[in-house]
Image (cartoon, rainbow, N blue to C red):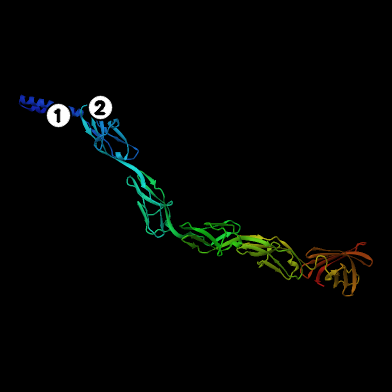
Amino acid sequence: MKWGIMQISRISAVRSELPHSGLRSVLSAFAFLVAFFAAGLSANALDIVSGPDDLTVVAGKKASFTVVLAEPGTAPKYQWRFNGEAIPGDAAKRAVFTVTAQPARDGNYDVVVTNREGATATSRTARLTVWTPPRVTTPPASVTLDAGAPLNLSVVATGVPAPTFQWFLGDTAIEGATGATYAVAEASVYDAGKYTVRVSNAAGTVPSKPASVVVRSIPVLVLAPGPTEVAAGVRARLDALALGFPAPKYQWRFNGKAISGARSPAYVFTPTLASAGSYEVVVTNSLGSATSDPFPLVVTAGPKIVQGPAAARLRVGDSHVLSVVASGFPAPSFQWTKDGKDIPDAVLSSLTISPARISDTGLYAVRVINAKGSVPTKPVQVDVSLAPYTAIPNAAFRLNGSWTDIDGDGGYVNEVYTLLKDGRLGYRDLDDNSRISLTYKSFKWVSPTTVTFRGETKIDGVAFVIDFRFEFTTATTGTYSLRGKASSVGYIVYQSGGFVYSQP
């Protein structure tokens, strides 16, 4: 209406400038007609300001086209069209048209809008692109072939957009295998297995059914043990794997001989030290066989005491060997101890005591050691004495010291006491050959290096009880103490000093 009014005003201005009234009348009529039609056109025009837009939708999903009018006027009517043909139904007579995407509905859409005044407008053409998920129409086929023959697998699939491919052997994607076909010029046992192909596009992904590829071949060992270390007494396992068709059979061998019952890819056993040696596995099928390289099996074991050393009672000068029997791998080493302290250089399975000395008396043990651990033997007592514990037969003690003269002869050096087999102790003074006889009362080894003796005698009619105590510090010498006491008087005899001992 504004356009019509503007034009009428302009024509009126022109008319007022004309000189003749007749011409002014004609222009007035023309201006009225122009204003009338302009006003009608302005009132009835339809202006589409947006839509519909192009859409890309996965099949099965909803696609909605929308159109927006600037001034719809009175009761606009819509008619949506597909590829130029009117779409039937009430759904196609609205400003928004919704359709379920299907491949058959992929195409061009527009809408024609009219109103009661008879105005008409046609929208732009919008494109509906329908994506369809991939579908495998022909999966790859299973095949059996000989080693060295060509392998060809293929798949046929549909989908929009055009699908892509990825081939798999088992669960592993095959590098570079991204086409509808997969080919190997010369198949080997490594190409045998289950194949699938994953088909993908923007609408989804689908795997094919698996295809089995069987390659007839002699066995090929793809896994075999190498040098192996196991622990004795601990369950161990050796594993092998062979490929080939027909399926290979297994036989494990030890030192070249078949192991009874060991016919599986895994050989499970509890090793002992005797299990150490050379192993191999043989795999066989109807086309041939293969044998692994022999490999060493090392069986380790912590040290174990088989037999420990034994206790011993020795005389001075004896020779004696303490020994231990032990097992273990690596071969054990040894460390002997005396009274809990390591004996220098005593690192063999045996320890020789020769010649035996009083100082060799003590508790002996040995530690057995290897890389897997250390174990000690129980300590054993070794006693070294001057004579058997029961007596010192005919043993002579030469005493040197200062003491009270108990025989009254004034002599108090170079006395010699002799313990006889029957337990009697004899005494003589070398300077006057006098002798005192003692009546035996008791004799006792207090320790491997100490002996006590008690005897009775009479001196000048007075009874004495005399106690001897000898402490041996080396094999033949020591210190002694001699105490005597009269039974009826307070007379006390005491002597101490060194002595020299000699075997009879």
Q: Is residue 380 left or right of residue 111?
A: right
> Is 175 above or below relative to 105?
below
For label 1, the SS is: helix
Q: Is residue 185 left or right of residue 391?
A: left
Q: Is residue 412 left or right of residue 140?
A: right
> Split into 4 quadrants, where in the image is the N terminus?
top left
Q: Quadrant of residue 36?
A: top left
User: Residue lying furthest front in this view?
Assistant: 286
The residue nearer to you, when weighing 414 against 390, is 390
The mark nearer the N terminus, 1 or 2, is 1
> Is 302 above or below relative to 29?
below
Q: Which residue is mark 1?
A: 7
Q: Which residue is mark 2?
A: 75
Q: Which mark is residue 426?
A: none
> Split into 4 quadrants, where in the image is the C terminus?
bottom right
Q: Is residue 475 left or right of residue 324?
A: right
The residue nearer to you, when weighing 57 against 294, is 294
Q: Nearer the viewer, mark 1 or mark 2?
A: 2
Q: Position of residue 6 (x, y in %)?
A: 16, 28
Crowd rating for badge 1 (residues with CA inside 10 Å; few <14, some 14–19, many 20+)? some
Label 1 sits on what residue type? Gln
Label 2 sits on what residue type? Ala
For label 2, the SS is: loop
Q: Is residue 209 visible?
A: yes
Q: Position of residue 153 (x, y in %)?
A: 37, 53
User: Residue lying furthest right in this view?
Assistant: 461
The residue nearer to you, when weighing 433 against 93, is 93
Q: Quadrant of residue 20?
A: top left
Q: Position of residue 172 (x, y in %)?
A: 42, 52
The residue nearer to you, when weighing 1 against 105, is 105
Question: What distance separates the C-alpha of mark 1 from that of mark 2?
Answer: 29 Å
